[in-house]
Amino acid sequence: MLHLASETPEAWGRWAVAHLDTIVLDHAHCERKAASNAINLIFRYTDQVHLMAPMSALAREELEHFEQVLAHMQRRDIVFARQFPSPYAGELMKACRVKEPERLLDTLLCGALIEARSCERMQLLHQALVDDGCDDALAALYDSLLACEARHHATYVELARGCSIVDETALRARLQVLAEHEAAVVARLPTEPRLHNGVP
Ligand SMILES: [Fe+2]
Ligand SMILES: [Fe+2]
C-alpha cells in the first residue's frame, strides 16, 4: 500500500528506457539525497529517540543503493556528474507546516510519499527493461530496489505514527492531503526524464 493519489501511466516506463542514461544518473542522485535526508533528520531531531536507529539504518541502505547505481553507471560508461536539482522535493515540502511538532509529522509523511513514488516508478522501469531486454542486470537492480523503497515508505509512515502527535484517523487524513499535494506537484512538473518529474 503506497498511499499515492495518482498513478504514473505504464508508458512512462518505455519513455524512461528511451532516456535510460539520464534516468540512471538521476536515480544515483535520488539515492544520494535519500541518504542525506535521513541523516538530516537525525541531526535535526536529536530529541526524537525513536527516529535515530531507523534513520541511521535507512541512510546506510540508501548509500548502498547509491553505490550499486554507481557501479551500473560505470558498467554503462555513464559519467557521474552534477545535475540541475529537480523541483519535486522542494515543491512537495512546501506543504509541510512550519511549527513543531506538525513539521516533523509532515516531513516524515512527505518522506514516505517520496519513497512511494520511487517505488512506483521503479516498478514501471523494471517492467519496461524486462520487455525491452536491453539491460537485464539493470532490470534485476530495479526489481530488488523497488521492494526496498516500498519498505522505506512503510518505515516513514510507521515513524510518523510513533511520534504520537495525532491519532490514527488524523494521521491517515494528513497522509491523504499530502498525497494529493504530491500528485498535483508531479502533474505540473516538467516532463524531463527523471524519477520524480512529470510524465510526457
Ligand atoms: Fe534507495
Ligand atoms: Fe528509499
Image (cartoon, helix red, strand yellow):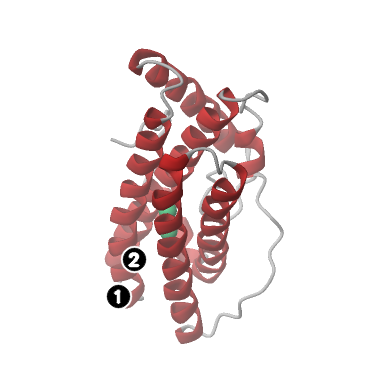
Task: Report if the CB atoms under discs 1 and 2 are less than 8 Å apart.
Answer: yes
Residue 46 horizontal side relative to residue 153, left or right: right
Q: Which numbered tag is attached to residue 129?
A: 2
Q: In this view, does 110 lie above or below 79?
A: above
Q: Quarter-wise, where is residue 107 in the image?
A: top right
Q: Is residue 193 above or below residue 92?
A: below
Query: Residue 108 versus residue 24: which sits nearer the camera?
Result: 108
Residue 142 x/y as whole percent = 34, 63
Query: Residue 127 versus residue 86: which sits nearer the camera?
Result: 86
Residue 114 x/y as whole percent = 48, 43
Q: Can residue 194 be seen in this view?
A: no
Residue 194 x/y as whole percent = 56, 55
**Which image quadrant shows ligand 1?**
bottom left
Q: Is residue 84 above or below residue 172?
A: below
Residue 136 x/y as whole percent = 30, 75
Q: In this view, does 16 lie above or below 181?
A: below
The disc labelled 1 sits on which kind of residue?
Asp
Query: Residue 195 versus residue 127: which sits nearer the camera?
Result: 195
Q: Name the residue under label 1.
A: 136
Mark 2 neighbour density, 10 Å: few (under 14) some (14–19) many (20 or more): many
Secondary element type, mark 2: helix
Residue drawn 36% across and 31% down? 3
Residue drawn 37% across and 49% down? 119
Query: Residue 140 versus residue 187: which sits nearer the camera?
Result: 140
The disc labelled 2 sits on which kind of residue?
Leu
Identify the mark nearer the N-term, 1 or 2: 2
